[in-house]
Image (cartoon, coloured by chain):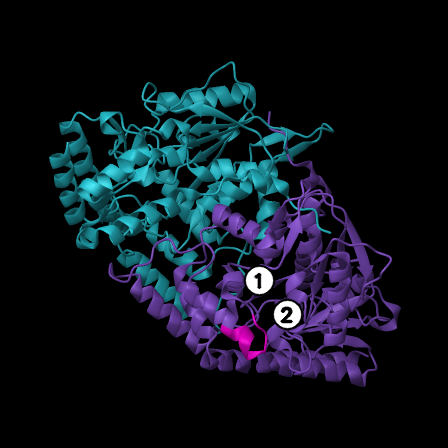
Chain colours: A purple, B cyan
Amino acid sequence: MPKLNENYQNVKDSYLFAEIARRVSVYEKEHPDKAANIIRLGIGDVTRPLTKSAIEGLHEAVESQAAAETFQGYGPEQGYAFVRKAVSDYYAKQGVQVDPEDIFISDGAKSDTGNITELFAKENVILVPDPVYPVYVDTNTMDGKQILYMDGTEENQFLPMPDDSVKADIIYLCSPNNPTGACYNKEQLKAWVEYALKNEAVILFDSAYEAFVSEPELPRSIYAVEGAEKCAIEFCSLSKTAGFTGTRFSYTVVPKELVFSASDGSTMSLRDMWNRRQSTKFNGTPYIIQYAAARVLTDQGMEECMQNISYYMENARMIAETLRKKNISFTGGVNSPYIWFRCPDGMESWEFFDYLLENAQIVGTPGAGFGVNGKNHFRLTSFGTHEKTKEAMERFKQLF
Amino acid sequence: MPKLNENYQNVKDSYLFAEIARRVSVYEKEHPDKAANIIRLGIGDVTRPLTKSAIEGLHEAVESQAAAETFQGYGPEQGYAFVRKAVSDYYAKQGVQVDPEDIFISDGAKSDTGNITELFAKENVILVPDPVYPVYVDTNTMDGKQILYMDGTEENQFLPMPDDSVKADIIYLCSPNNPTGACYNKEQLKAWVEYALKNEAVILFDSAYEAFVSEPELPRSIYAVEGAEKCAIEFCSLSKTAGFTGTRFSYTVVPKELVFSASDGSTMSLRDMWNRRQSTKFNGTPYIIQYAAARVLTDQGMEECMQNISYYMENARMIAETLRKKNISFTGGVNSPYIWFRCPDGMESWEFFDYLLENAQIVGTPGAGFGVNGKNHFRLTSFGTHEKTKEAMERFKQLF
């Protein structure tokens, strides 16, 4: 009889979005007259269509698959050289040097942040912020690994900093953060890199929201910090940058400098291990999507992306302005599509969810879904339309 | 300092295709006059372009991503209902009932056969045929799992059968087989299902080449055998069926009947575990590809696929006929795009590789790359053009 991986029994069911859907559905049934009024600012999914460059790139690539002369079968598991180069060039425009050979193209930052745990043995001290994107916790739990949490609170503006008394081996950071919208500045990231180098720890840096950083002095990549190539793996994606949530394209940087000792004294390269992992358990991102992604990463392609991002950030501005007027403290809203705020009147996050749904027909995301430290906080997103976001904020203003 | 997964040190480097490329390159440099003559019948990749239905489906789906009204963001991790239904209907046409709820859409049988190992604990007896598709071995080795091999030989026509003295927990089967082209008949698969049910083992059945089965009495799915839903997971893909090797679409069936005991006496469902795995570490196959795949799985779409498969099978027929004329015993060539034969004159497979390259400028794949039992065998594939395959077989006939 097969012996199953019983660590799965320790993974919590992901109730969050199912529970949100259930409560909204109950409300709609009880208040059919108000169902049409509901405005959803809870989801973390984009709504603007793909850009002109992406669409043109996709059509061109599809057409090339229709003729034997230009047909592409299996591609390199690491991604085509042309798109690894395009990602490297994209970094270079931010003043960050990344060797194309260290860039691995994939189908999602979720896949890669999840699968990367395979490279590490069970015996590691894994440090994860709370509140947090649940994938970091769930994937390590499935592996039977122990997690240490570090608190994100209003006191540290949801940007936990290294604690020298904690000896971590692997550290998850996400900046700009999901769900808090908080963004580390360069000094703060430098402190993390210094901690990692001193403790020989590896930072797993999720920069999926880097394109929303508008303040030029804020780092959009951990490799903007000197020495990070000796201690950090970075995960990024076109999901939010180019609206690729349903199209799927991401990239992970595993610098060749990441070499550690094995128990027999030999050395192992994380880059080589990741290459072996991807070559063995992945067959590459679809050719047509790699082709379109390279088009998106050109100057013209990114200009179109930035138009969509500006559209969303206008929503973020409206939400932030409303909270500011109501003296509600928040993080995010600038440099991030997320706005994270303390629930008014001492409410807990699920209580506030119900209150906001019943009294203003606004759907958001309760902070409790992201960890203990989210229990009095709430997340709104800027991925709606201007009209709906404006209307939601008018209702919000009247309510408080 | 991070403790790495040292099982990676036990994974053999995949020299096979790199070594083939190296030897061909050396030959080309030493014989520049003959470089243009080289015919490659080694690769397992398709060469015919995508079908009309696939191209039309892709273009339509791309266009729908250009407008906000039809734009699709994150989809269900398990795949859209419309394509899970299309896969279920495709099975139904072969007389096999599969619940759409048990079908998980993914980006490759390689990804899924690799990732499925996560559901199982280390302490399992894992049975793998030799010769074999290397992914089964490598992914279990990366996990630190022990593998037992079962011999595929000329005596059993490379179709190993269950041995009651071996108590396996997990069994890998691939039929039609890569690399041997051998295909289990219904009686043989029934014996495997009976063994699995008796021993409470799980069969991991790779049916990636099912569309090449032309003899109607041969099973194209393990679920053609009664009781298989209680003991088998099936992996299939459009890679070879529809030329999707660069487009990426696969499906895995994990029947809800697969429920086993945990050590605390509770029960765990492999379907629920796989659902949790995919929901946590995967964000779904690209929408545009799912849309096109559903089009491919229609009657019209499959008719177009079968035209390409017939094209390849004409190559297989030519190769098989040549071997038959030369009294060289082989498996495959019918019901499979692969032809697997004993190297003539007692040669070992790498020796024969060099001999064939030097004397006929034909590139094939040495059987040694697939396991110990392949050391005197050789694989040719039918994925070339008619012209090149015909020319190669004429050279082959003259050589022996």
Q: Is residue A92 magenta?
A: yes
Name the image quarter holding residue B187: top left
- Quadrant (top left, top right, bottom left, bottom right) of the C terminus of chain B: top left
Asked whether, in this view, residue A359 is left or right of residue B260, the answer is: right
Residue at the extreme front of the image, as rendered? B30
Disc 2 residue type (three-letter):
Tyr
Foreground pick, B397 / B109: B397
The mark nearer the N terminus, 2 or 1, is 2
Tag 1 subunit: A
Residue B101 place in picture, x, y as percent: 52, 44
Q: Circle 1: is it few (<14), some (14-19), or many (20+) Cα within 10 Å?
A: many
Who's the residue at 36% across and 36% down the image?
A: B178
Disc 1 residue type (three-letter):
Val
Foreground pick, A374 / A128: A128
Residue B263 can be seen, yes or no: yes
How many labels, in total? 2
Q: CA distance from mark 2 to mark 1?
A: 10 Å
Asked whether, in this view, residue A180 is left or right of residue B292, the answer is: right
Badge 2 is on which residue? A223
Residue A383 can be seen, yes or no: no
Foreground pick, B361 / B185: B361
The label shown at residue A253 is 1
Q: Is residue A310 above or below residue B223?
A: below
Tag 2 subunit: A
Residue B319 place in picture, x, y as percent: 19, 36
Q: Which residues are magenta?
A: A89-97
Residue B343 place in picture, x, y as percent: 26, 29
Q: Circle 2: is it few (<14), some (14-19), or many (20+) Cα within 10 Å?
A: many
Q: Is residue B327 magenta?
A: no
- Circles 2 and 1 in contact, beta carbons < 8 Å: yes
Who's the residue at 45% across and 34% down the image?
A: B205
Asked whether, in this view, residue B153 is left or right of residue A216, the answer is: left
